[in-house]
Image: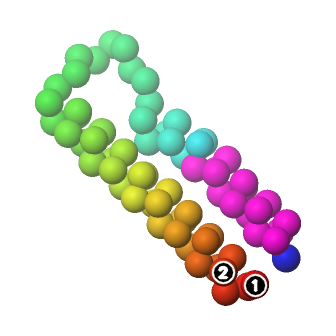
Amino acid sequence: MGKKLMLAVAALALSVQSAMAQVFPVDTATTTVITNVRADIVAWGVVFIGVALTIFAYKRIKSLVR
């Protein structure tokens, strides 16, 4: 059961990586505006909270399975 859970976590990490490329496209033609920076900071905060919750849930489930 542990190997399946690890595989699921790895698949989630890979899917998040490809999703991040779509959320934060690199466009060198546009200039940086404070609203864009603020939106990027909020988006990164949501991503980090999601990662923290995923790690917490993984540890919680792992402790329940044992």
The residue under the point 72% across, 55% down is 11
Q: CA distance from mark 1 to mark 2?
A: 5 Å
Counting from the top left corner in percent of width and height, residue 9 is at 69, 60
Counting from the top left corner in percent of width and height, residue 6 is at 76, 62
Residue sitting at the far left: 34
Amino acid type, callout 2 = Ser
Would you name the residue on which mark 2 appears? Answer: 63
The residue under the point 23% across, 17% down is 31
Amino acid type, callout 1 = Arg
Counting from the top left corner in percent of width and height, residue 56 is at 52, 69
Instruction: Specify whether residue 7 is painted magenta.
Output: yes
Quadrant (top left/top right/bottom left/bottom right) for the N terminus: bottom right
Residue sitting at the far top: 29
Instruction: Reply above or below: 1 against 7.
Output: below
Coloring scheme of the render? Answer: rainbow
Q: Secondary structure at mark 2?
A: helix
Q: Which mark is residue 66?
A: 1
Secondary structure, magenta segment, majority class:
helix
The residue under the point 85% across, 66% down is 3
In which quadrant of the rendered view does residue 64 lie? Answer: bottom right
Counting from the top left corner in percent of width and height, residue 33 is at 17, 26
Q: Does 23 sit left or right of 58 as displayed?
A: left
